[in-house]
Amino acid sequence: MTFTDLATITAPTTITTPIMESLHDGSRSTRSPGTVIVGPGGIWIAERNEKRALPTPVYGVKGFVEWQTDRARKVPHGVWAQSTALIAKLVNENDTMAVTGLHGCTSVIVASKKAIYMSHLWQVPSFESFQPWVTRENELAITRDQIIDPLIHGAGAEMPGLISYTGAGEAFADDTEPVIIIVTPRKPGAAPHRDVWRRLKFPEKVNIIVQILQNYIQQSGPNTEVEPLIVDYVASTDPDKAAREDAISGKVLFQYDPAQAMVPEPRKPCRSYQQAMFRLWVGDAPTPALEKSWRALPEQIVSRHGKRVIPTAVCQQRSTRAAGGKATKGSVQ
């Protein structure tokens, strides 16, 4: 199959025949069947292999994020400016979740080794109001009523509160290593600056959210305060509402795999443990905003995931000796 043939593809497709790839130096290489996923127009958007189970972009982050977002569970948009959120436990199955339509709105995300929480917070009136009678005191009261209280205590079935998940043994307990991520718009015309706070459109409101959340979400150890990850984005200004809400800059994608890899035990190289992982993508940024891996928890163990650790030199040597009848211990597990 050639890339000319791939250009006729109209939906994400796993290629089941070998692909001949022309490289920049004029040479060619062949991709094995079943490893490449191609999107509309022949854009190579993902590749699978034994070591990396989560789909990853190969050519074009935009097509990859759009494809994965279409397949993901999405945080609903509340009516009458209601804040909304989804929460899911990370168990022994792959999962994807997404927030879409951020064209001035904000998403507060909390991710841990046990769960993912993603929210959608409206720009108006939660973060700003265009009404001339609204004073600063009124704005802060709206921030409390529309953002802080719903985030912490919840507001109906479509807005679970975080306070229910922060106690011992819960999804965002101290020992789950929770992380706070806030995806929020950049100030129009803001110059590039290493300090993200100087680029934000709503720095005061975001800072209030951070300070409140840090009272509830902490980590075990001497430094219990969770340092938030602030990610700013450029909001789409497309006059067409549908196009604006579908803009890649307004998408946040969360991917989770409970069995991303099998990793050798530090002191037992012939034994391995299951490693879980999540990634968070924001817009068309070339790399994930956040990536975390850990030893899979009991509820995340997959009995048959088919991933095998590549034997170390020590394991290979012991395995060879065992095959020759000179040793019976130390074969690859």
Image (cartoon, grey):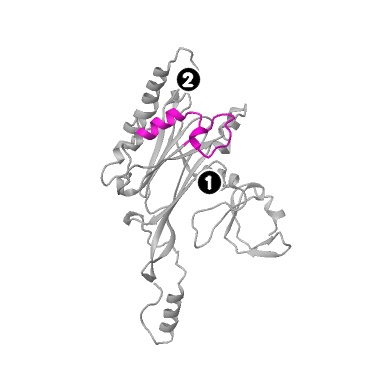
- Of residues 44 and 40, which is closer to you in this image? 44
- Of residues 249 and 35, which is closer to you in this image? 249
Residue sitting at x 33%, y 40%: 217
Q: Nearer the viewer, mark 1 or mark 2?
A: 2
In the picture shown, does residue 42 fall above or below 201? below
Residue 5 lies, in percent from the top left, at 70, 54
Q: Which residues lie in the magenta part?
A: 183-211
Mark 1 lies on a secondary structure that is: helix
Q: Check residue 129 in the rendering and tell me which mark sits there, or answer none.
A: 2
Residue farthest along the top direction in this orientation = 133
On the picture, is 291 further left or further right than 271? right
Residue 165 in the magenta stretch? The answer is no
Tell me where residue 264 sits by quadrant: bottom left
Q: Do residues under tags 1 and 2 come within 8 Å of each other at their CB atoms?
A: no
Picture quarter with the N terminus: bottom right
Residue sitting at x 53%, y 46%: 68
* Amino acid type assigned to the residue bearing label 1 in the image: Gln
Residue farthest along the right direction in this orientation = 26
Residue 191 lies, in percent from the top left, at 58, 33
* Amino acid type assigned to the residue bearing label 2 in the image: Ser
Residue sitting at x 55%, y 37%: 193
Residue 84 visible in the picture: yes
In the picture shown, does residue 177 fall above or below 22? above
Mark 2 lies on a secondary structure that is: loop
- Of residues 81 and 202, which is closer to you in this image? 202
- Real-space Cα distance between discs 1 and 2? 34 Å
Picture quarter with the C terminus: bottom left
Lower position in the chain sequence, tag 1 or tag 2: 1
Q: Check residue 68 in the rendering and tell me which mark sits there, or answer none.
A: 1
Residue 193 in the magenta stretch? The answer is yes
Q: How many marks?
A: 2
